[in-house]
Structures are given as structure tokens and as C-alpha cells.
Image (tube, grey):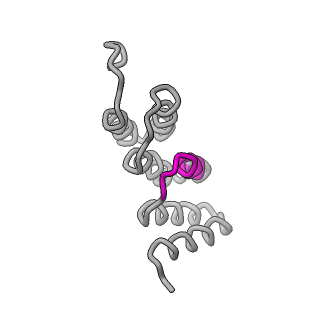
Amino acid sequence: MLSNKAIPNEASVTSIVRLASAKKDGDYAFELIKKMNKEYNLVPRLRTYDLALLCFCENLEAEKAYEVEQHMSSMGVRLEEQEIAALLKVSSETGRGERVYEYLQKLRNSVRCE
């Protein structure tokens, strides 16, 4: 696509991110997401981030998952229950108690429990 000088859009980048995530290459998926904003001035959506975030969570790469979450926040993309649950699970499985509590609070707020 780039070799033909075609400018990608959010949907085409998301498709490539999906392929990278299917190959369990979260690093490449996340690099594509960062590149789409810096080089093409495209704003990633939740559906784009979701793939890289879940890939890192499934591979128990907590620090990388947290980095994706921070990037999401900086771009104004909010976590939903599925993403919070994945971050909660990876935090629990990697022994990060302070993060477990943080994600429990986010989950509670997202489902509006009182």
C-alpha cells in the first residue's frame, strides 16, 4: 500500500494491526498504531488499540499493555469492560496488586455499581 504511495486510513491500519495481533506480534501492532498518528495524522479508535492491548494481555506482557493503555488515554480513547477485564487479569496474574485495585475501581466505575 505504501509502496504505491497510497495513504492509509484508520480502517486499513486496523486491518494490518489485526494481522499482526493474530501472529501474536503485539510490538509490531502497537508500533503501527503509534505510526498512524505520527506520520499520517490518523486518530486510532478503540477497535485499533483493542487488538494490541489484548495481544499483550494474553502474552502476560503487563508493562507493554500498560503502555498501550497510556497511549490510548493520551489519544482520548476510553477503556471499556473487555479491556479493563483483560488488564485486571494480566495485573493479577503477574502479581501487580496496586494495578489490580486500580482496574477494579475502573471496572466498577464503568458498570456504574453503587
Residue placed most toward the observer, 15 or 11: 11
Q: Main secondary structure of the magenta part?
A: helix
Above/below status of 87 relative to 22: below
Above/below status of 78 relative to 112: above
Q: Residue at x 62, y 72 (%)?
A: 101
Residue 83's quadrant in the figure? bottom left
Residue 39 lies, in percent from the top left, at: 49, 25
85 sits to left or right of 17: right
Q: Residue at x 47, y 31 (%)?
A: 41
Residue at the limit of the structure toward the right, as seen here: 98
Residue placed most toward the observer, 1 or 74: 74
Is 6 inside the magenta-drawn segment? no
Is 66 inside the magenta-drawn segment? yes
The stretch in magenta equals 65-78
Q: Residue at x 49, y 39 (%)?
A: 30
Residue 49 lies, in percent from the top left, at: 44, 47
Q: Residue at x 51, y 65 (%)?
A: 89
49 sits to left or right of 66: left
Number of numbered discs overlaid on the protein picture: 0
Residue 45 lies, in percent from the top left, at: 41, 46
Q: Quadrant of the N terminus?
A: top left
